[in-house]
Amino acid sequence: MRDIHTILDRVPMGRAGTHLMDGCLVLEGGAFRGLYTGGVTDALMRNDINIQTVVGTSAGALYGLCYAAGRIGWPSRFNIRHCADSHYAGLRAIRKNGGVIGFDIVFEEFKTEDHENILRVMNPRRRMVAVATNCLTGQPTFLEKTNCSDIFKATQASASMQVLSRMVYLDGIPYLDGGNSCPIPVDWAIAEGYKKIIVVKTRERGYRDLEEQEVQLRWEDRLYHNFPALCDYMMNASEKYNQLCDHIDQLEKEGRIFVIAPSQSPDVARLEKNPEKLYRAYRMGEVNTLHRLKKIRAYLES
């Protein structure tokens, strides 16, 4: 395996421009498969494709936050650098953060490393939406700076994986990973009236989810028996995800959305510890986007 500094040197750094384009960027989650998303968003920003609205679920919310801040390379470099650190991803993170991801490390660096990050995220011209699952209703909530008290806490809620994380309370409401109720928020973008919608998936075209394992279902039932609506939704999550993928395929055929998806199955575990595998996922996202850059521009400008 290559030295981690050699890998990091291959990931660009910089700041996106300030010119905004109409439309909505929709980002799927997928834990560390989000490195693919990082390659996509970096390729877009480096080519001055800064879409006004970004809506993301789980890891997609974290990458959406950095896209809104215009930070080229930052989230991908962060994940590659810290992937083997159990304070960030693992048991020590659970002890300190109540979840398998160390959001204290993420947000401390994000907020203090460059004040421009916060200024851009809070800019009223930018709309950044994090999708989290309301544990009381089992339904998705679309959290943004205009309807919640803390967009960073909303991003954490969106990415707090069930079973492996405690519920995140925001404005008195308990939330978990948005992937439980709305893994790819394309219908939200349509309902909001956006005419130009780019969807970034972290699974290859044609992928369909298998039914949840019995062991996981038992854990979910044991942990969330006081939240029956949440349990009901998680029980059918795979079926609903597959229906959503069929729906996205149809929208793409109709030309209503533009989809960017991995050209092959990403070889990345949910909590991947191998930085080279993470970089390969990043590079695939970058290459897939650059190969379709002319078509992306034509779609956005038509």
Image (tube, rainbow, N blue to C red):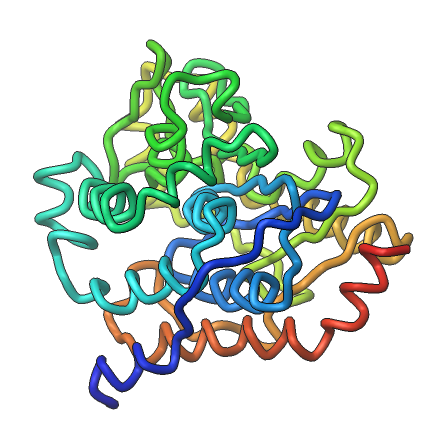
Q: Residue at 25%, 36% (x, y): give it.
A: 165
Number of residue marks? 0
Residue 206 drawn above or below residue 105: below
Question: At 23% across and 64% down in the image, what residue appears?
Answer: 83
Q: Residue at x 19, y 47 (%)?
A: 105
Q: Quadrant of the N terminus?
A: bottom left
127 or 2, which is in the foreground?
127
Answer with left or right where residue 135 lies relative to residue 218: right
The answer, for residue 48, to whether it is visible in the render is yes
**In the image, 135: left or right of 250?**
left
Left or right relative to 258: residue 287: left
Q: Nearer the viewer, residue 149 or 232?
A: 149
Question: x, y (%) of residue 12?
Answer: 42, 73
Q: Quadrant of residue 189?
A: top right
Residue 100 seen in the figure: no
Residue extending furthest bottom? 2
For the C terminus, the image quarter is bottom right
Residue projecting furthest to the top = 172
Task: Write the residue at 62% across / 46% down.
Answer: 26
Q: Please tell me in which quadrant of the rendered image residue 270 appears.
A: bottom left
Relative depth, front residue between 169 and 112? 112
Compared to 127, does 69 lie above or below?
Answer: below
Residue 190 percent location from the top left of the image: 77, 35
Question: Could you say where residue 205 lies in the image, as x and y percent from the top left?
Answer: 67, 66
Q: Position of residue 181 (x, y in %)?
A: 53, 32
